[in-house]
Image: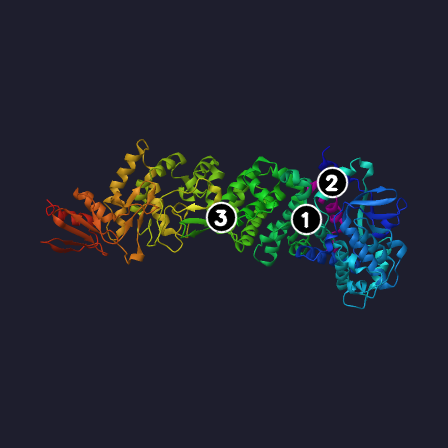
Amino acid sequence: MNFGERVRTMNRNIGQLLSFVQLLQLDEMDNISIPVIQRDYAQGRIDTQATEIRNDFVLSLRNALEMNEPLTLDCIYGSISERNFIPTDGQQRLTTLFLLHYYVSVAAGKLDSALLSKFTYMVRDSAKEFCESLATHSIDLSTKNPSLSIKNALWYHGGVFENDPTINGMLNMLDEIHVKFGTESALEYHERLFKDESPVKFWWLPIDNFGFADDLFIKMNARGKSLTRFEVFKAEFETAITESGNADQVHEWKEKIDNDWLELFWQYFGVDAPNNAENGLFRYILFIGETFHSWQKKSVFVSKSISEDNDRLQYRNTITVFQTPNYFEFLCASLDGLGKLINSSEFTNCKEFFKALVTGNNLEFWKYAKLFSVISFNVKFGAMGNFVPFMRVLDNLIAYQREINKRDMIFNTAIDGVSYQSFTNGIENLLLHMNTCGGDVPKALQTVQSISGVSGLSNEKIKAIYISKHGASEILKLEQIPEMCGLIHNFIESDKIMITADKLVQVVMNKRVFMQLLQSYSPDEMLLLRVGYLWPMVFGEENSKTYRKHRMWFNKSENGDFMFTAAPGDTKKWQAPLKALIADLSTMPFEDIVAEMEELLHKRINSVKFTEWFDYIVKYPEFFVSDEYCCCMIPEYYGGTGYLCLVTDKNWNSPYNPFCKALANKLGVPYKVSGDVKNILHLPNNITAEITNDGGWSINSEDISEVLPCSAGQDCIMLAVDYLTTKIV
């Protein structure tokens, strides 16, 4: 049995639940001795971390005594040697309890020196002498700080005691206890603290009989002895849940929190599991709690509270929110089902996110949202329910929550700290509706109404109707095309798939022709915008799970919606040309795809009206550097708009003016240009042809000075060709 298994076996066989007084009065021992190997008293330090822990712990002790409610301080391990109990783990808590009992006894005028003298330090002689002297002397508590009264006492050896960090820590703790407790309720506190039914207790376990005292001693010292953030949290949490009327459930909670549930997190920390597994469990609880808190308050999801350093994890919101019975039940159910979930094959694409969560690495909000939604599904239906179809829909809905990053020319997920609460709450409502449908995902999608916070449900409804009649096979093939991001509703018309996945893959492989075709169906500037950035003709990153998509086919609308994923009703202007193109593509025989697309494009060219500069994209391949990029760009910072445009690749290599390039190619002459936007073409016979902002030309030479206006409906490139053909001979 390895160390972790032995510790967990030990926890399941805890000996006695004792108060500090009961421990001091045990027949089998005379004293509690903090051994030399133990480190100094850390809870009394004055650094920020220790101060925060000290404040929280003393506050939880006061609340327990004030309300006479149980506060269990986890386990205290140790061995008994020559009638001395030598704690292996629990030094910090025992020292604080010694100081608390001393303070309350003095404040109540009932100092029992014989009893408290049983607690001593063996770390160094000065600490031992201080504890013995303190236990046998009362102090003046009328001063602001008890530490000052002690330092002024005749028994206090200033030169020796002041250099002992353990003594300084004890003085700081006494001052903290004085602030939190005061003397007004000292008699009441004393009565509750010193009776057998004291609300403050811990599990005491002498480990000699387990045969691994030395092993445990080394391991427990390796992790440090200060009361951890998680230990403080558990004490406060259990008290709060009990107060909320869930005492029966708290008993089960206590049984599992340090055993079955904690075991689930050991696998993520390897050899460091004894030190860090409880922090992984802590972060998981905080994650669920922060999500529910954002629902309750309709507030921002604070991911930082989960990914903070171990001893700075924030849990106030979590304690409050789990006093709501349904939320506490959800937490327990999620932990009960977590083992099967995280080890199931269906959870594979979430395992990386889960490990990052429990090890304290911050995640993007959409990853938190996916994790919570999967956990919630597991609570309601189990890991083996309709997990696969639900995950497919969840991925699609996450992909649909998107916004444009104009600087980087990509889609980013629009799920942030604010929208996280509405999206996860919306998915929760979808799951509740699925529950009424027996977990049937397509049925639930067909019958669900719109849900606040979740865009794209109408698209999933279209697919669900198709799946219910024809099965999911063809839908899945289309969704798996990386360019689609799972959003293929526009390829379904009247309960029919317009173009199969195999054919669509062939179409998008021929990017340049496809882009020209798509523009030919558009009534407006679909592909390009007048901005100082390139519009890359690419189809999304390989890893579609990142939900960061390069722009592909866009319109000029404010939203710049992704053409293939335009939502029904939202962007009808842009759906119409796309639907028309898909309909025409679906009629092709797909025997020679390139020739067939070129033929379709040739037919479309005849319908181009040449009323705007972007209409030329359909007819002239010069508007593309290569099949990789759609590169027409309007450099507004040059003062140019309209026909004053450049074409370049993403690195600004060899930019050119597409109108001048197309004219040079039509005339069969070299492409030689000048001008800031390369809009002056140099031709034979010292003739220059300058494209103007309105699409006209200014033709100049020693003998020519001609302006060729281009009227709406005219092809300005062919206009210049007709004029210049005889002039350059």
- 32 left or right of 476 in image: right
- Residue position for label 3: 457
What's the colour scheme?
rainbow
Q: Amino acid at mark 1?
A: Glu
- Which is more N-terminal, label 3 or label 1? 1
Say which residue label 1 marks: 329
Query: Would you call the spot at circle 3 few (<14 residues within 10 Å), some (14-19), or many (20 or more)?
Result: many
Question: Quick one: quadrant of the C terminus?
Answer: top left
Task: Say left or right for 478 vs 633.
Answer: right
Looking at this view, is 586 or 538 the one in front?
538
In the visual, does 426 lie left or right of 251?
Answer: left
Q: Residues within 10 Å of mark 2 (few under 14, many from 20)?
A: few
**Mark 1 or 3: the one toward you:** 1
Q: Is residue 715 visible?
A: no
Report x, y in % for residue 143.
79, 68
Q: Which residues are magenta?
A: 242-262
The disc placed on residue 218 is: 2
Q: Position of residue 216 (x, y in %)?
A: 75, 39
